[in-house]
Every structure is written in C-alpha cells, then in structure tokens.
Image (tube, grey):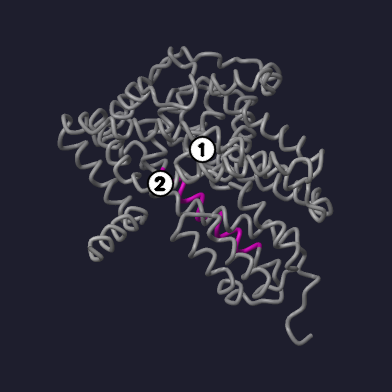
Amino acid sequence: MKNGVSLGKKIFLFLRTPYAIVIGTLFGIWIGIASKDISLLIAPVGEIYLTILQLCVFPILISAITVCVFKLLSTDDFSKYLSKMLVVFGFGFLMITTSGVLVTLLFTPGEIKNTTEDGLGELMIHSSNTSVILQNSTYEEISLYGTGVADTSQDMVNFFIQLVPKNIFEALVEGNSIQVLIFSIILGLSLGVIGVQKAKTAVDFFDSIFEAFSKVVMGLMYLLPFALCSLLAKSISSTGSDFLFAVAGLLVMILGICLVGIIMGFMVINFRTSHLTTLQTLKALREPLLVALVTANGLATIPSILHSLTKEMRYDEEKVALIVPIGIILGRFGTMTVFSIMGIYLAQVYALELSFAQIAFVIFSSILAGIATAGTPAAITVISIAIVLTPLGLPVETAIAIMLLMNPIIDPLLTVLNVMSNMLATTLIAKNKEFQPYGE
C-alpha cells in the first residue's frame, strides 16, 4: 500500500515537470498527424480544460491587482522610491514592448509563404469557431487575406473613454478584461486611501479568493500535459504539419529576443555592480537564473534574488526587499514582449495594415495586458492577449492556439527574461554607490 501511494505521488510530481509537458506536446503532435478521428475524440478534454481556466481568470485578476495596488499604497518606504520605480519600470516596459514590435515589423514572421499558408489558414478558421475564449471578438468578417477587419478604424479617444466600466457586473458578464483591470486598480487605490485597518477585511477577502482560485489553477497544472496533447492534436489534425513550420520563424524570433534581452540585462548589471568582476557577477546571478529556467516560476526565484542582490552583490536589504517582490509580480517583461509580438504578427497574417496609432496601441496595450497578468500562471496569462487583440478586430482564439503550442518551449526563457529584467531594475533603483566591498 505504501509503495502504491509512493508511486501515485511520483506520478503526480512527474506531471508537473517539463518532461511531462514535452511528452504531452509530442504525443499531441503525433496524434494530430496520425489520426484525425482520435484527435476529435480527445478534443473535449482540451476544451473543458480551457473552460475551467476561463472560469478562474477574473477572480484571480481582480484579487491579485487589487491587493497588489493596496499594498503599494500602504507601504511607507515605497513612497520614497515611487517616482524612481515608475520611471525605471515604465521605461523598461516601453523599451521591451517597442523592441518586440520593431523586430516583428523588421523580420515579418507573419508574412506566410505558400507552403504554410493553407495550414495556418485552416487553424484560423478552426480557432474562430472555438467557444472557449476570453472575450467575444469582433472579427467575424476576417479571412486569411480578407479586407473586412471589424472596427480597424476605431477612434482611439473613444476607446480610452470606454476603458472605465460603467457597471463592473456588466463588464464581467461581457468578459471585458481591460475594464475589469481598470476596476481592480481603482478598487486597490480606494482601499489604500481608507487605510490598513478599515481595509483589512476586504484585503483578507481578496487574498483568500486569490489563494482559493490559485489552488484550482495549480491543480489544473497536473492536467496540463493531457490538455496540451488534446489541443495540439485537434489543431494539427485540422491544419497538418504545415502549421508547425508556419510558427517556426515566430518561435525562433521570440527566443532570440529573449536571449538578447538576457545578455544585455546582464551586461548592464555587471556595469552597475562595479565592485565585482564579470565572473563574480555571473556567479552571483547564477542561482536565481537557474531557478527561473528550471521552474518557469518567477515567484519561486524571489528568495534567491534577495540573497544574490543583498549578500553577494551588497545592495541595501530594505530597498531590495521592497522592489523585488513588486517587480516580479507586476514586471512581466517577457509576457509584454510576447503580447507585442503577437499583435503585430497576427496583423501580418491577416494582411492588416496597421496605422501608427494602432502600432502605438499595441505597444501600450501590451504593457497593460502584461500588468493584468500579475500573479497569474502561464496558462491564464495566454488568455489575457485579448486586451491587445480585441480592439484591433484580431482573433483571440488564434493567438491562444499559437501561444499554447509555443508556451512549453518559450515559458522557461520568458521567466529568465522576467527575472533578469527585474534584477536589472532593482540595481538601477538601489544605487550600489552606497555599498563597499568587504574590508573597506
């Protein structure tokens, strides 16, 4: 009996490893290529999985953003560094999303070749009929090379006016993610204004909601290999293997941007930390980067980041302890990069010519969408792409299908980019001139 229990625990632990995800991905690809009948048979598994994830999106989003904003306002030390944090993180967000947009415009991975056009086109048609989505999109008139994109000339002023919900319950029913995000920020600010004592009950309530739905999502992570197998099998059986080649360029480009960002981040940190050699800096940062790569979980890296920056790189403990958790939760640099890339990529796929205002909207909405994913797991993060795509009339389901396919490959490196970017921001805010090497 003990051996049986032990074996069961080992199986559950294995389902959370990257190996299980890779196996599920490979099986999904194989089933999709080999048997369309089996693909259709197991398709409901993936659809039910996404439906349950959709159920968890808004409770997690509202509770995470509300509590995070409240804690920012109720921290005395935070006010001293608020302006600098806003400048550093704001500039970082703008730089990373702009880079994603410019690189995508330069390399045009969405300009599909004849050999992959049919495969990706079939995915677009198939995904547009999927009922498991975050929002009701406005792209019914879109075809792969059609001209009828709904509301592409939408007035930007009216759009920003509509960001604030008139009725939060109406926004929830309609699935308007960005209005729910704005409501959560306003609620967090309001709780911060009335003070810790009066807001304690509400904050504890939202903390409990976040923990409860996080447990649901964590439980779903055990089923992720099966869901990926189902979703990929159905997608590939409808599109053929051409789809894999269609996204290969996009995949390589995302990984390349991540690597360049990580290397540049390390170079700046090494320059800022002048009292350490390059090898000493690399050794100090090794643990948090490895934890990020292995776990693909930014929160899991916080203890090692605090140790590396304070004990090995000699930054002030109070400043680091204040900045790092906030940065890891809100500073989703990798997510913002992918969102900005996907916005331009899908516009290229659908041959949609974006105006300068629309390109600027992709940049800023990617920042908002990235912040909106604060505290959420990767599977829910994918769904938040609706904030970027829906106002442009681009299909949300297509982006979800592509990102779910790529996520097992890119998620570890995106986490490393998040961790490196947040460590860089921390070193820029907490000046190292206050610290001296031991013995001086």
Tell me the SS state at disc 2: helix
Where is residue 265? Give x, y as percent.
61, 59
Using the rendered view, name the quadrant where residue 140 is placed. top left
CA–CA distance between discs 2 and 1? 30 Å
Residue occupying the point 66% across, 15% down: 155
**Mark 1 packing: few (<14 Cα in 10 Å), some, or many (20+)?**
many
The quadrant of the image that shows the N terminus is bottom left
Image: magenta residue range: 251-268
Mark 1 highlights which residue? 341
Name which residue lies at 28% across and 47% down.
24
Whether 255 is among the magenta residues is yes
Vertical placement of 431 versus 139: above or below? below
418 lies left or right of 400: right
Does the magenta run of residues contain 427?
no
On the image, numbered disc 2 is attached to which residue?
Answer: 219
User: Mark 1 belongs to which amino acid?
Assistant: Ile
Task: Please name the predominant secondary structure of the magenta segment in the image.
Answer: helix
Of marks 2 and 1, the one in the foreground: 2
Task: Depth check: give the residue in front, 361 or 287.
Answer: 287
Q: Is residue 342 above or below residue 408?
A: above
Q: What SS does tag 1 mark?
A: helix
